[in-house]
Image (cartoon, helix red, strand yellow):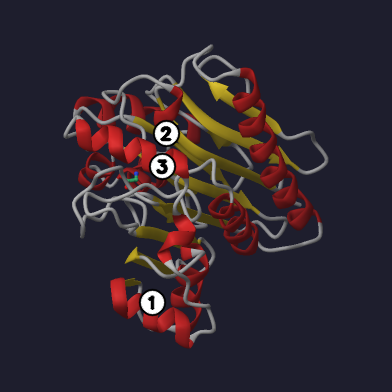
Amino acid sequence: MSKAVIAIHGGAGALSRGRLNPDAEQKYRQALSDVVSQGQKMLAQGASALDAVTEAVRLLEECPLFNAGIGSVYTRAGTHELDACVMDGATRKVGAVAGVSHIRNPVLAARKVLENSPHVLLIADGAEAFAEAQGLKRVDPACFSTPERYQQWQEARAGQQVWLDNDARAPLSEKNKFGTVGAVALDSAGNLAAATSTGGMTNKLPGRVGDSPLPGAGCYASNSSVAVSCTGTGEVFIRTLAAYDVAALVEYRQLSLQQAAQQVIMKKISDLGGSGGLIAVDRKGNVALPFNSEGMYRGVGFLGAVPQIAIYSGEDN
Ligand code: GLY
């Protein structure tokens, strides 16, 4: 019997204690706890890891607190371009979409690509046409907008900045904790899965694609190693193939999950000036959640246990 578990993240960034007001902090903790609880419930009922991570990320996309789905950041053109990926560790099938603006839940479109197409990654109009043909409703991109994200965009434009989802160089205010979301899980049949979804970075160039929809960069799962979902400066996670690098260190160098995940974030990502973190789980139910930023919204739920939610560095989970 496997040690079924789900872990989620809601982005990493300049999140030091005291910067979030208590009400906001409580909202984040509650939202993370609700998603972990739902994942635990599904896994306890025998759901696959693939279904659990898809649903966890869909719920995070629905939550305006996080930069994915509703609450996605703005591009330089004032639009929303969303990316998502989901990968099944049992089959190593993967589906992804990038640069979509009319799909409410990009992770569901990614799942359709995985299940019902011969492809791995569909982009923009083609991805949207495919999703519609698969029964996903076309939505007005205005549904992704929130006043908070609009304000962040105005500030980024005024400063001519491009804020990565977790950029430590961004002004250190509560407003800038806007991150990618993700989930990894091990189910009771011993299968692994990972999913990642994002609005990208505030004021990004239209057409820019980050690591989140790229298998091996921001999302990866294989039953022969680990499941990983990343959050951070997408370009560096792409250049290091961060998610796959964790898997390769475990599979080929027999590092522990913790050692592999730490090495990728603290050495490879940091050496290239990248900021962020990742969540990872292996087939024994070990979980790693390293980050090199001040904090990372995160949660872990083993079956039958209370969800462990944390934001700041030094908090247990
Ligand atoms: N890590 C998400 C992005 O850079 O788009």
Q: Does 309 appear above or below 233?
A: above
Q: Which residue is mark 1?
A: 128
Q: Nearer the viewer, mark 1 or mark 3?
A: 3
In terms of sequence position, does the residue under pointer 3 or pointer 2 come before the other? Answer: 3
Left or right of residue 32: residue 218? left
Element carrying mark 2: helix
Element carrying mark 3: helix
Q: Which quadrant of the frame does ligand 1 lie within?
A: top left
Dot 1 alpha-carbon crowd within 10 angstroms: few under 14, some 14 to 19, many 20 or more = many
Residue 183, percent across and down? 55, 48
In terms of sequence position, does the residue under pointer 1 or pointer 2 come before the other? Answer: 1
- Image mark for residue 102: none
Residue 127, percent across and down? 35, 76
- Image mark for residue 261: 2
Q: Depth check: give the residue in front, 148 or 3.
A: 148
Q: Nearer the viewer, mark 3 or mark 2?
A: 3
Between the C-alphas of marks 3 and 2, the distance is: 31 Å
Between the C-alphas of marks 1 and 3, the distance is: 23 Å
- Report if the CB atoms under discs 1 and 3 are less than 8 Å apart: no
One can see residue 221 in this view: no
Dot 2 alpha-carbon crowd within 10 angstroms: few under 14, some 14 to 19, many 20 or more = many
Name the residue: 49% across, 60% down: 143
Residue 195, percent across and down? 49, 55
Residue 221, percent across and down? 47, 56
Q: Disc 2 residue type?
A: Ala
Q: Which residue is mark 3?
A: 149
Q: Depth check: give the residue in front, 237 or 78.
A: 78
Q: Does 94 appear above or below 164?
A: below
Element carrying mark 1: helix
Name the residue: 74% across, 55% down: 43
